[in-house]
Image (spheres, helix red, strand yellow):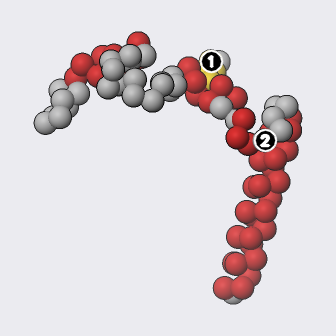
Amino acid sequence: MINEKKQRIANYHDQTLKNFVELLGAAGIKDSDHLTRSHIYRRVFMNKVHTFEDIYPSMEPGAMIHEHIPEKYQDDFKKAFVESWH
């Protein structure tokens, strides 16, 4: 029984990797290092889809420290304190 489960898990993992590579190829991406938030879409309403870049905007390293905060995060940033969250 354990050996059967081990084989099923291995097969599932292999198939997942194969499908991932196929999706990359369909998107015209040659290397997974080139996959970005802009390539991944999420349905947010029944007839509305956004990329992960739209939902979770990228930031430069250190942006929060230097207060170069994307508009989407500005309200949250104002509510955040070291001691608590308001």
**Mark 1 and mark 2: Cα distance apart in space:** 28 Å
Q: Nearer the viewer, residue 50 or 75?
A: 75
Q: Secondary structure at mark 2?
A: loop
Horizontal relation, residue 50 to residue 17: left or right: left
Q: Which residue is mark 1?
A: 48
Q: Amino acid at mark 1?
A: Lys
Q: Quadrant of the C terminus?
A: top left
**Residue shown at 58%/24% (left/top)?**
53
Query: Would you name the residue on which mark 2 appears?
Result: 31
Element type at mark 1: strand
Residue in view at x 72 percent, y 85 percent: 3
Q: Position of residue 74 (x, y in %)?
A: 33, 16
- Dividing the picture into quadrants, the one containing residue 41 is top right
Please state if 85 lies on the left or on the right of 76 as rendered.
Answer: left
Callouts 1 and 2 close, C-beta under 8 Å: no
Tell me the quadrant of the picture where the N terminus can be found: bottom right
Left or right: where 60 falls relative to 64: right
55 horizontally vs 86: left or right: right
Q: Does 32 appear above or below 15? A: above
Q: What's the residue type where badge 2 is placed?
A: Asp
Measuring from the top left, give residue 39's x and y in whole percent: 70, 29
Q: Residue at x 62, y 30 (%)?
A: 37
